[in-house]
Amino acid sequence: MANACVLMRTRLVSRVVTGIYDQELRPFGLNSSQFALLVVIAQLGPSTRAEISRYHHQDRSTLTRNLQVMLNQGWIEEALEGSSGRGRSIVLTKSGRDLLHAVVPAWRAGQAQAKITIGQSGVVAIRQIADGIMNMPERA
Amino acid sequence: MANACVLMRTRLVSRVVTGIYDQELRPFGLNSSQFALLVVIAQLGPSTRAEISRYHHQDRSTLTRNLQVMLNQGWIEEALEGSSGRGRSIVLTKSGRDLLHAVVPAWRAGQAQAKITIGQSGVVAIRQIADGIMNMPERA
DNA sequence: CTTCGTATGTTGCATATACAATCGTAAGTC
DNA sequence: GACTTACGATTGTATATGCAACATACGAAG
């Protein structure tokens, strides 16, 4: 069972890789989870928790709480304008954008270390797997 | 940045895969993290938290707490005999072994669904990456 | 045997994660 | 326009995760 378990291996890799980036990001006061959310929000532009949830495959309730921490840090804010439809859009603040810029070297260091840890072929494979998931038909 | 981030993709895959197995395991009253620990302990035999920590790349303090839940469930227990050296060895109880057997079909269902989600090539790639990590020189 | 170093385990703290249940409101139906 | 449906967000609950600091006890060195 231990010999072929996709779950165990996936989570092992996730723990190790998360640890690498956590270490690089720590001096900036953010962790891997928060960094990923910053990037997603930067990429999506103004978007509701529900939209982020679908894109990021993360529970809405998790986002409510994780984003609250980031709101407190002043990295993101609720957009007042485009609140036409349902939900309340989240956007990066200037502080959030600045942080994202400042963190780039640390991110590169993490990338380099991750590449060493999982190999070039691993990088390519993870990319393909993730792309496949992102392109899957919406949850049935 | 979002286009090449190993961290984000790794964690995305982990969330999705974990969700698959969580769903299959739920009827048995255990989750992905607990299942993985059961398998590791079954594989290692009597082992201390520190040994599990190194093998499983998980913090000792995390194990103290996660194993406590499993102790409460009666799936594992502290071995009284071989407490010669430092630390206290953990072993599966009969209840734990039975659970592990009972859960096999659910695990297989998870495996099948995971294979669909990440593809056959993904399964192979994850396996290689994890094996690479497991065979890395001990923490510097 | 005493001393010293170090590995082990635990606790405090902060955060992450998801399910179930709930509340409120937009959107669709008639 | 009133009714119904479905979506969005939040809260309660439980667990997971790791860092820092700590107490303890094993083992090595003398």
Image (cartoon, coloured by chain):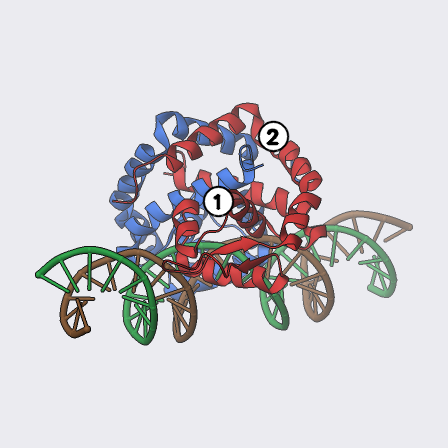
Chain colours: A blue, B red, C brown, D green
Residue D11 sits in quarter: bottom right
Mark 1 and mark 2 lie on one chain; the one further toward the N terminus is: 1
> The C terminus of chain B appears in which quarter of the rendering?
top left
Secondary structure at numbered mark 2: helix
Marking on residue B115: 2
Q: Residue at x 37, y 58 (%)?
A: B85
> Dot 1 corresponds to which residue?
B44
B109 to B48, vertically: above or below: above
Which is more toward the observer, B94 or B104? B94
Q: Indicate the amino acid at tag 2.
A: Lys
Marking on residue B33: none
Q: Residue at x 44, y 46 (%)?
A: B56
Q: Is residue B5 visible?
A: no
Instruction: Find residue C11 and report its horizontal and vertical position in percent.
Output: 42, 74
Q: Residues within 10 Å of mark 2 (few under 14, many from 20)?
A: some
A20 to A126, vertically: above or below: below
Residue C6 sits in quarter: bottom left
> Both on one chain, marks 1 and 2?
yes
Q: Nearer the viewer, mark 1 or mark 2?
A: 1
Q: Residue at x 28, y 44 (%)?
A: A104
A17 to B92, vertically: above or below: above
> The N terminus of chain B appears in which quarter of the rendering?
top left
Secondary structure at numbered mark 1: helix
Q: Which chain's residue wears label 1?
A: B
Residue B111 sits in quarter: top right
Left or right: residue D8 compared with residue D30: right
Instruction: Find residue B19 and report its horizontal and vertical position in percent.
Output: 60, 45
Instruction: Find residue B72 and report its horizontal and vertical position in percent.
Output: 60, 65
Q: Residue at x 65, y 40 (%)?
A: B107
Q: Residues within 10 Å of mark 1 (few under 14, many from 20)?
A: some
Q: Indicate the amino acid at tag 1.
A: Leu
